[in-house]
C-alpha cells in the first residue's frame, strides 16, 4: 500500500499533467502553420530585413524566459495595449488564463519549430522545385507537392521539439499567467510549488520523473516519425526515378 501511494498521482498532480498536455497540444497547433511559413520565408527568400527577422524569431532562445513573459504581460495584460483593448471591446482576458499559458509557450517554442523546419526546407533540391515550375505548376502547388513533403521529417521534428519545449516552459509562463491551480499550474509550475512547501518532495519527484518520461517519449517518437518520413520520401523519389 505504501509503494502504491508513492507512485500514485494525486488529483492535483493529475490536473497539472492534463493541463500541461492541453497547453502543449494547443501550442503546437498554434505555431504549426506560422512556423512553416516563416521557415520557408527565411530558407527560400532574400529580402531587406531578413537578418533582423531571423534574429527576432530566435530572440527567445537567448533571452531569459522571464523577459518574453514580462513583455507579454505588458502587451496582453489587463492594462496592456492589446490586452486592455480586448478586455474593453470583447470582454476577453488573456493574462492569468490557460490561453495565456499557450501563448507564452508558443513564443518560447516557436524558434525551435522554425529552426528545424528551415533546415529541412533549405535542404530540398531546388532542381525538383524548378522542374515543377517549368511544367506550369503554381508556386503554392510546388510548395504543397514538392517542398512540403520533402521537408516533412524536419517539420515533424520541429513540432515535437515545440511540444516538448511547451511541456517544460516555466519562466515566461509564471511571469505572464502566474501559478494558479487548475488554470495555469502546469507540470513545471507544480514541481516548483511542491519544492516550496513542507513534505512536497515526494510529489515533486513524481512529477519530475513523469516529465522526464514524457519528454523521452516525445523525442523517441520524433526519431521514429522522422525515420519513417525519410524512408517514405526515399521510396517516392526512387519510384519517380524508375
Image (spheres, rainbow, N blue to C red):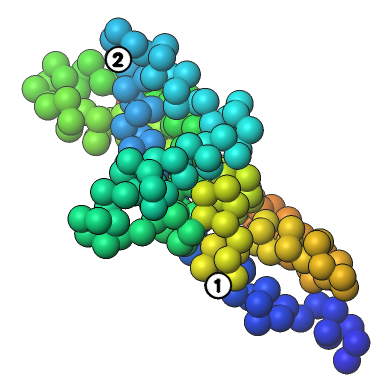
Q: Quadrant of the N terminus?
A: bottom right
Q: Quadrant of the C terminus?
A: top left
Is residue 80 toward the left or the right of residue 15 in the image?
left
Above-or-below relation of 180 to 233: below
Is residue 158 visible from the viewing direction of this image?
A: no
Q: Position of residue 206 (x, y in %)?
A: 79, 68
Residue drawn at the location 23% of the way across and 16% of the way down: 130
For label 1, the SS is: loop
* Along the line of sight, the residue nearer the viewer: 118 or 57: 57
Q: Position of residue 70 (x, y in %)?
A: 53, 40
The circle drawn on residue 45 is 2
Is residue 47 toward the left or the right of residue 111 in the image?
left
The circle drawn on residue 89 is none
Looking at the image, the residue that sits furthest to the front is: 79
Residue that numbered label 1 is attached to: 182
Is residue 55 visible from the viewing direction of this image?
A: yes
Residue 198 occupies which quadrant of the picture?
bottom right
Residue drawn at the location 90% of the way across and 87% of the way down: 2
* Along the line of sight, the residue nearer the viewer: 56 or 121: 56
Residue 213 occupies which quadrant of the picture?
bottom right
Q: Are marks 1 and 2 in contact (CB under 8 Å)?
A: no
Looking at the image, the residue that sits furthest to the bottom is: 1
Residue drawn at the location 27% of the way across and 52% of the way down: 86
Is residue 177 toward the left or the right of residue 137 in the image?
right
Residue drawn at the location 52% of the way across and 26% of the way down: 59
Looking at the image, the residue that sits furthest to the right is: 2
| Crowdedness near tag 2: few (<14), some (14–19) or many (≥20) residues, C-alpha within 10 Å | few
Q: Position of residue 227 (x, y in %)?
A: 54, 42
Q: Position of residue 192 (x, y in %)?
A: 74, 58
Above-or-below relation of 132 to 52: below
For label 2, the SS is: loop
Amino acid at each position: 500500500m505504501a509503494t502504491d501511494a508513492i507512485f500514485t498521482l494525486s488529483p492535483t498532480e493529475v490536473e497539472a499533467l492534463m493541463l500541461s498536455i492541453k497547453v502543449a497540444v494547443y501550442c503546437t497547433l498554434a505555431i504549426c502553420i506560422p512556423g512553416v511559413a516563416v521557415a520557408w520565408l527565411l530558407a527560400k527568400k532574400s529580402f531587406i530585413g531578413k537578418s533582423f527577422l531571423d534574429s527576432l524569431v530566435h530572440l527567445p532562445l537567448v533571452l531569459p524566459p522571464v523577459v518574453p513573459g514580462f513583455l507579454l504581460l505588458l502587451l496582453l495584460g489587463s492594462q496592456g495595449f492589446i490586452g486592455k483593448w480586448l478586455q474593453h471591446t470583447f470582454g476577453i482576458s488573456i493574462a492569468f488564463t490557460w490561453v495565456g499559458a499557450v501563448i507564452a509557450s508558443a513564443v518560447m517554442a516557436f524558434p525551435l519549430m522554425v529552426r528545424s523546419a528551415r533546415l529541412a526546407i533549405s535542404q530540398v533540391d531546388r532542381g525538383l522545385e524548378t522542374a515543377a515550375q517549368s511544367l506550369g505548376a503554381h508556386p503554392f502547388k510546388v510548395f504543397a507537392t514538392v517542398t512540403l513533403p520533402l521537408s516533412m521529417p524536419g517539420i515533424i521534428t520541429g513540432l515535437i521539439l515545440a511540444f516538448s519545449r511547451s511541456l517544460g516552459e516555466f519562466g515566461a509562463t509564471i511571469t505572464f499567467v502566474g501559478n494558479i491551480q487548475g488554470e495555469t499550474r502546469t507540470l513545471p509550475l507544480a514541481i516548483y510549488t511542491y519544492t516550496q512547501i513542507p513534505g512536497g518532495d515526494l510529489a515533486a519527484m513524481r512529477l519530475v520523473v513523469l516529465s522526464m518520461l514524457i519528454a523521452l517519449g516525445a523525442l523517441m517518437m520524433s526519431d521514429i516519425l522522422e525515420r519513417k518520413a525519410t524512408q517514405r520520401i526515399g521510396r517516392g523519389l526512387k519510384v519517380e526515378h524508375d
